[in-house]
């Protein structure tokens, strides 16, 4: 059923001539654009034009890879199925609104027809032409809307059923995408937990080696550095103190020194 819906999407966006591309792009993996062109039996430029039109509506996604030998980039494409179904659902809603409005107008208004030319007129246009056909001049006759209404209602039911089927397919597709997303998240979490466990083991191993004395621990190394710095500071302070003491002795005034020498001489004479 999805293939039919994707074909309908391509027909709406690009046209009937490109509907076969839907089957090629309905893959989980991206498809090489040259393979698409070959299978559709069209040129690469024609293929790209179709793909770019679909891409403008966000219905297809692409990745590019560089050719190591030739040096140019090749694009790989695939259908975004959930977005395509959403797009189709919106288009069907538009059609349903149009049909409902036409049913209301047919039920409330009168329409006239020229049986010879098979041209239909609403009441206002028929009045403007005096209820005569502008092409052949025949008198217009009142149209029976029962058959038209029956066709409209049949189309309405058909589109409503199609819309319900699209909703079911869209729900299934969203569930698939959610499972894929959850699987990817779980995979990443497992990888992270493995990495954390590995890091813990490495730290434990480093700690064991440090305890055995093979590798000095970081804490001990830090303590040694701190002790060395402390010693240097003490030494500097001592040197500063000594220098200051010497300077004090040198800065004693000469008068005081002379007095000390005279006092010493007097004490010697008394003896």
Image (spheres, grey):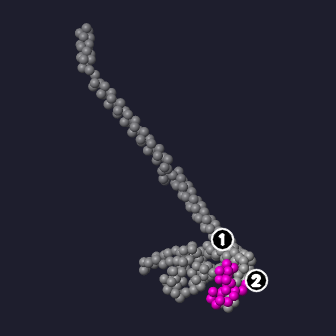
Which residue matches tag 1?
Answer: 174
**Toward the viewer: 100 or 192?**
100
Residue 125 on the magenta span = yes
Left or right: where does residue 74 sit relative to residue 249? Answer: right
**Residue at the farthest top position:** 270
Q: Position of residue 140 (x, y in %)?
A: 69, 86
Asked if residue 248 is positioned above or below residue 140 in the image, the reply reads above
Picture quadrant where residue 231 is located: top left
Which residue matches tag 2?
Answer: 146
Q: Position of residue 186 (x, y in %)?
A: 62, 65
Where residue 125 is drawn, which disc sits there? none
**Residue at the farthest front position:** 130
Q: What secondary structure is marked by label 2?
A: helix
Task: Tell me what residue is drawn at x 59 percent, y 77 percent.
Answer: 79
- Quarter of the picture containing the N terminus is bottom right
Left or right: where does residue 172 sit relative to residue 235? Answer: right
Q: What secondary structure is marked by label 1?
A: helix
């Amino acid at each position: 059923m999805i293939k039919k819906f994707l074909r309908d999407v391509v027909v709406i966006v690009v046209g009937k001539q490109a509907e076969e591309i839907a089957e090629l792009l309905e893959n989980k993996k991206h498809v090489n654009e040259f393979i698409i062109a070959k299978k559709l039996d069209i040129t690469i430029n024609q293929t790209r034009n179709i793909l770019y039109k679909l891409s403008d509506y966000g219905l297809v996604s692409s990745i590019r890879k560089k050719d190591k030998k030739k040096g140019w980039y090749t694009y790989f494409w695939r259908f975004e199925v959930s977005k395509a179904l959403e797009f189709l659902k919106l288009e069907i809603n538009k059609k349903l609104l149009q049909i409902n409005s036409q049913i209301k107008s047919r039920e409330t208004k009168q329409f006239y027809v020229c049986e010879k030319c098979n041209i239909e007129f609403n009441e206002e246009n028929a009045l403007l032409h005096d209820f005569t056909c502008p092409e052949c001049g025949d008198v217009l006759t009142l149209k029976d809307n029962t058959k038209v209404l029956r066709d409209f209602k049949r189309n309405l039911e058909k589109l409503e059923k199609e819309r319900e089927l699209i909703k079911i397919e869209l729900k299934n597709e969203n569930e698939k995408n959610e499972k894929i997303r959850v699987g990817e998240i779980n995979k990443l979490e497992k990888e992270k937990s493995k990495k954390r466990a590995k890091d813990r083991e490495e730290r434990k191993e480093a700690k064991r080696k440090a305890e055995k004395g093979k590798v000095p621990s970081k804490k001990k190394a830090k303590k040694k550095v701190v002790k060395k710095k402390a010693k240097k500071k003490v030494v500097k302070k001592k040197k500063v103190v000594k220098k200051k003491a010497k300077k004090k002795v040198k800065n004693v005034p000469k008068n005081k020194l002379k007095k000390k020498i005279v006092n010493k001489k007097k004490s010697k004479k008394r003896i």
